[in-house]
Every structure is written in structure tokens, then in C-alpha cells.
Amino acid sequence: MKTTANIIREHQEAVYDSQIVLVDWIQSIDEDIPASEENLRLYPSLFYAGIVTTQHYAGRDYHETDQVDYTDLLEHRSIDQLTAKEQRQLRQQIRVGSLYLADYKNDFGMTKDEVCSLADSYQEWLFEEAETDDWSTAMAQDSPEKFAEYCDIYYGSAPEQAAA
């Protein structure tokens, strides 16, 4: 599900499965429906996209292509582009302190690496706030609200949008 109203276009970076990909092409399931901005906005489930993923291994880049549902693509965002509410929701989706990158997968268009780094610095901040080296004491302060507070202090947040 898209978290923003922005349209993802061909030859643009996006996030798929919490990693950055390049959208190579967008096509509808019916050749009579053009991939116009209006159609993508109104009927996103009628489209699929060709993506290119780049993996870095042993000093070389390897490119893989895939075909995915258009609705599975997210606009790449950073923590300061999320509202405080979205930051709280992000905290509920991840496992702070996890050693596994998969535990940082999210629905907000941030890569797992970005969220892992953010969670590590948040955890360090919790230790500083608790003035302790004890993990359980520091993590007892953890909450979605505390995470949003940390994000606002160090990164800021997007303004909440007024209800229409």
C-alpha cells in the first residue's frame, strides 16, 4: 500500500521489499489502458512494473531484473519525511537491537539499512537517556512515542496533514 500520493514513474528510484530499485518500465494488465499518471493514481492495481536491483559483491555490481505489482513499490523516503504518527508506526514495525536486517523491513519507503542505522542510533540515545549501560534498563524506556521524540529531536518530522 502506498504511503504517499506521489506517483512512481519509469526510470525513477523506488523501494521494493525495503531495498532501492530502479523502475525500468510500467505496464498495465490490459494493453488498452495507458500508464498515465491519472490511471496510475486511480487504478494502481491494474499495473505492474519491471524493476532492476543492483547488488554489490566482491567489488562488482550485479544487476537483477524482476516484474512486480505496481502497488508493491513505495516512494523512497527518509525519516524526516515521515510525520510523527508515521514514525510511531514505523517503530511498531521494527525490532530495535535486532542483528537481522529482515527485522527492519517496513512499509514507509525506507531501506532496511537506513532503518537499521536509525534504530542503532536510537538505541544508543536510550542508553544515554537512562544513564546506564544495562540493556534492560535502557530498553524499558522504549516506546513508539519515545522513538518519535528521538526522531523529532535529531531529524525532525514532516508536518501532520490536516484532515480533508
Image: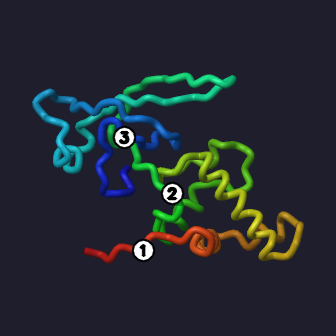
**Circle 1 sits in a helix, a strand or a loop, which is it?**
loop
* Residue identified by numbered label 3: 12
Secondary structure under tag 2 reads: loop
Quadrant into which the C terminus falls? bottom left
Image location of residue 134, percent across then percent down? 88, 66
In primary-sequence order, the first of circles 1 and 2 is 2
Disc 1 to disc 2, C-alpha distance: 14 Å
Q: Amino acid at mark 1?
A: Pro
Residue 94 marker? none
Residue to which mark 2 is pinned: 78
Q: CA distance from mark 2 to mark 3?
A: 16 Å
| Crowding at mark 3 (Cα within 10 Å: few <14, some 14-19, many 20+) | some
74 vs 25, left or right, is right
Looking at the rendered structure, the kind of residue marked 3 is Gln
Q: Please say if 40 is above or below 53.
A: below
Residue position marked by numbered label 1 in the rendering:
159
**Which residue occupies the foreground of this view, 136 or 19?**
19
State how the image is colored: rainbow
Residue at (46, 36) in percent of width and height: 21
> Could you say whether the residue bearing mark 3 is in a helix, strand or loop?
loop
